[in-house]
Amino acid sequence: MTLAQSHRLPLSGNKVLWLLVLLAAIGSCTPKVRRVGKTGPVKPQPTVTDKPAEQPPVTAEKPVVAKTSSIALLLPFGLDNIGSVKGYKAADLKKADIAVDYYQGFKLALDSLTAKGYNYKLQVYDTKDEPGYTHSLSINPAIRNSNLIVGPVFPEGIKSFAGKPVAIKKPLVSPLAPASPADFANPNLITVIPPLDYHAYNAAKFIANRVRPRKIFILRSGFTEDNKYIVPFKQSIDSISKKKIQVVYYTVSHGSFKSLLPQLNNKVENVFIVPSVNQSFLTVTLRSLDTLANHYPVTTIGHPTWEKLTFLKPDILQHIKAHITSADRINYRAAAAVSFIRAYRKAYKKEPSAFAYKGFDEGYYFGEVLAQQDDALNQLDQHSYKALHNDFKFVKKAGQGWINTHVNVFKYNNFELKKVE
């Protein structure tokens, strides 16, 4: 199944109809490589790589690159639901939305690169988000012979596809899941979304280098879920500060800080790590921190998912100088983002979702890397990239493959998140 042409989706908003169009596209396209002219979709922000400066697009009569890179894209469209009696369930339709949006962004990126003379063979497969069927795709010769495999998008799908022991030795991109690569033990894996460990590390780095406190107070809710953040944070702060910053654990009960007060200092910043995402705990604890900030200098570091928690009060977050880490915050005013939005609207007659941005970023980055020397995918640390939603800075870990480690730090200021590092 080779997708070689852009297929615009209808304006009706009927997502099942969109999927029907996509199904027709996948079924009707023949294996070929598409090249577009100088009116290609979008010119993104430049890649920071070891290649020469960007050249203007060239015409089909004089290609820059003769090499054709093959990419297999594995996404959970769930197209079988279209012909079923019950149709799409809400959960299945949500997955299909992710698949369509990601595919459209990815394809738009390759269209942009073909405008520069690069060649790609893009094959798109429906995983159906079914473990058995997803695993069966791993024996498909067309997939196994691809230069790069992108997807599946969910952790269980990655496990089903890769298998144990690892059956496919080709680079395998985990495009959307922030799951720890240690869960997969696949040396061929490329994890694009930084796992929680790297959020904790970058938070520790920010505190040690910018805030420089004498103590750090970790406020525990009592739920074991907190440890997913606490453990890597403690390891990181000890390593970065060489254990010169004291870490104090404190389990908060009913929002009370009474027994902690003797350890606080009204002359320097008191840094509180709050790794919880529990609504009842956060509502009470942050209100108590807000009161505490009337008497002591307070800086708070929250869990990265705080950005999506609508019950948090912006005025409280600002007063307690709350910071969070983020790996997918888009600056919609940036020139590259404006260009992408304009091109996406023109191509698909709809607004891009967060998954469309990520599809474009990853399609452009990996498409450009593939177009370079044959072993470029084994040297991702030499190919940094300033994407629309995050930067790509990969490191390789033994047995876990390549991991994007770049995370930004944001602070609540003037009732919005503003980048501080």
Image (spheres, grey):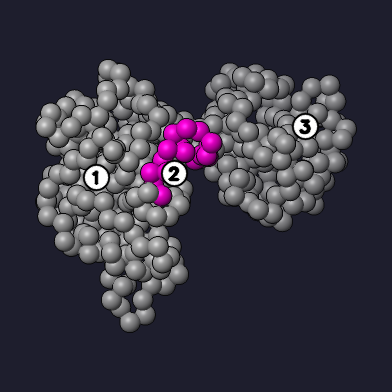
Q: Residue at x 14, y 30 (%)?
A: 63
Identify the secondary structure beneath mark 3.
strand
The residue pinned by badge 1 equals: 149
Seen in the image, is 196 located left or right of residue 57?
Answer: right
Work out whether mark 3 precedes mark 1 in sequence or the reverse, and give the earlier one. 1
Q: Position of residue 105 (x, y in %)?
A: 35, 47
The answer for how far apart the CA atoms under marks 2 and 1 are is 26 Å
| Number of numbered callouts drawn | 3
| Amino acid type, residue under disc 2 in the picture | Ile
Which mark is first along the chain, 1 or 2? 1
Q: Residue furthest right?
A: 295
What element does badge 2 sit on? helix
Q: Is residue 294 above or below residue 347?
A: above
Q: Quadrant of residue 372?
A: top left
Residue lying at 22% horizontally and 51% vertically, measured from the top left:
5
Q: Between tags 3 and 1, which lies in front?
A: 1
Residue, disc 3: 298
Dot in front, 2 or 1: 2
Residue at label 2? 341
> How far is the residue under mark 3 from the one under mark 1?
46 Å
20 lies above or below 87 = above
Asked if the residue at tag 3 contacts the one at tag 2, i.e. Cβ–Cβ closer than 8 Å, the answer is no
The magenta stretch is: 328-345
102 or 110: nearer the eye?
110
